[in-house]
Image (spheres, helix red, strand yellow):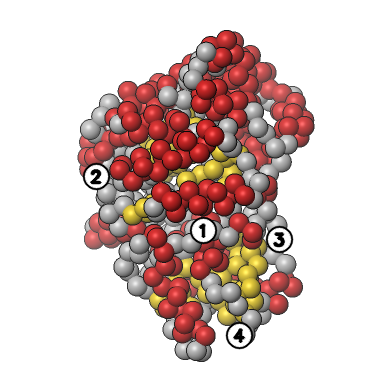
Amino acid sequence: MKIINVLMIQPKTPQTFWSHDISLKAAGFKTVMPPLGLMTVAAMLPENYKVKLTDLNVGDLDLQDVEKSDVIFLTGMYVQRESFVNVLNICRERGKIIVAGGPFVQAAYGMPGRDKLELDKIDHLILYEAENNLSSFLQDFDRGEAKRVYDNKEKPDLALTPPPRFDLIRPNDYACMALQFSRGCPYNCEFCSVVQTFGRVPRTKGTDQFMREIEALYATGYRGRLFIVDDNFTANRKMVKDMLRRLAAWQEEREYPYLLFTEVCIDMAGDDELLDLMMRSGFTSVFIGIESPDVATLRATMKNMNITCDMSVAIEKIQRAGIEVMGGFILGFDTDTENVFDRQLDFIRRNGIVQSVVGLLGAMRNTDLHKRLEREGRILKDSEHCGDNVSTTLNFIPKMPAEKLIEGYKRVIMETYDPHNYFARALTLLKRFPDMRISRLYRAEPWRRKLSMSKFNYSNKSKLAFEFIKLLFSSFGIQALVFILKALRLGLLNLPISIELTLRGLHYMSVTKRITDT
């Protein structure tokens, strides 16, 4: 059987709130997480396909690898567009067969403008989910009859999804590893593309299947943070609880090799059994799309799950369980009034949301929002929104004057990540966390002690210490030191999280400067 050499390429991600450049450097990592999509697609290829994976967030593209390849597999999100197009042109100039899919390709396909011109350079497009389309492409490709577009929209059973190929990466290059448990979301928020991509019926892997993936990751020797990449991890409550019961026991038996985080809806706080299982499974943070404190805005955008509870009460309940709440906020909704900026700042401050990702609304393609604004003639055809949470360019005409909206957005970002305000929120969070005094923890449940001690497992403690000492001599070093001393008064075991929060803060402030200087 003929050997086919495949080069898979993950484009470079620019600096955003999620890139964590400064804190990654301090801890000795090269980037945040590996390209799970490519690693999973690689596991779907036949044995005669010999795969090399290049992540441009870890290292540069080796042109010799391009020359040696028979086929290039390329993916990326819209935020990676610049790098995606650069790689596409390099491979095209060398006459390589290019196969591409993923969020950027999915969003750009069938749309006019500059992105169509780029997609025209791609030989084969794998749209929607690979489980339904990749095998058809491979069969046709082997016969020399491959079509340009494969676009089966059916939602595949995730039992068809193989474990990702961890052998294609160096796990210790990454600050965290990534696995997927489910796809889809029962909610249909107007501005979100998840339902259009993965459907409203949440599909999950089986518990045995997911635990095999955890075991495969464990066998690599990697220990540390693990991101469950689901857009709504708790959407299928029955299946996620079944899996978490197994995961909690597995984690406790191995003294918590993984600290987990994921994305959820705020209504998870109303399910005590679910919250307890997530605690015992080792979840230390969750990202929640809060979007706005305004009920009228939430109702208008179909973010109804945020209306059914007191969001402040729900956030504090999650925090008191020892799970940090990272919040997503959006400015630019039609219902936003001039006081929205102060209301956002007040909500973030009161609730101790340390990582508050505030972005301008973008009308992403294939969303209900984009369709509505297009009907209303409000889409700006010559402007693109990359969805990176740091862009000050709008791709639609807002109800609020654009200059006032952008000015208000910049003020929210500046005040949110002012060092004094940042450390005040961080201290609020630590005060809500479970007691981290050694004497109190000694009397806690065995699983709680093990989970707390696992937070000290940094892979490169000497480098971290060196970078942290340098940080103390930076422009906000005194404020950082005062924060850490206050954190230690709440319990000596707060040391690792207080150092992490300090390093994260330095990154957020760097991104803030980039936004406000534009």
Vertical placement of residue 15 versus 152, above or below: above
Give the distance between the C-alpha atoms of the residues marked 4 and 2, in whole angstroms: 53 Å
- Disc 4 on helix, strand or loop? loop
User: Could you tell me if the residues under marks 1 and 4 are in contact, i.e. CB atoms within 8 Å?
Assistant: no
Quadrant containing the N terminus in the rendered view: bottom right
- What type is the residue that disc 1 sits on? Pro
Rendered image: mark on residue 302: 2
What residue is rendered at 54% in x and 65% in y? 43
Residue 21 image-quadrant placement: top right
Quadrant containing the C terminus in the rendered view: top right
- What type is the residue that disc 4 sits on? Met
Residue receiving disc 3: 60
For the residue pair 144 and 108, the one nearer the viewer reads as 144
N-terminal-most mark, 4 or 2: 4
Q: Residues within 10 Å of mark 2 (few under 14, many from 20)?
A: some
Q: Residues within 10 Å of mark 3 (few under 14, many from 20)?
A: few
Q: Position of residue 271 (x, y in %)?
A: 30, 31
Residue receiving disc 4: 1
Vertical placement of residue 41 versus 493, above or below: below
Q: Position of residue 168 (x, y in %)?
A: 64, 61
Residue 165 image-quadrant placement: bottom right
Vertical placement of residue 267 versus 69, above or below: above
- What type is the residue that disc 2 sits on? Met
Q: In front: mark 1 or mark 3?
A: 1
Asked whether the viewer can see residue 454, the reply is yes
Residue 418 image-quadrant placement: top right
What residue is rendered at 68% in x and 22% in y? 477
Residue receiving disc 1: 163
Give the distance between the C-alpha atoms of the residues marked 2 and 1, in whole angstroms: 35 Å
- Disc 1 on helix, strand or loop? loop
Asked whether the viewer can see residue 120, the reply is no
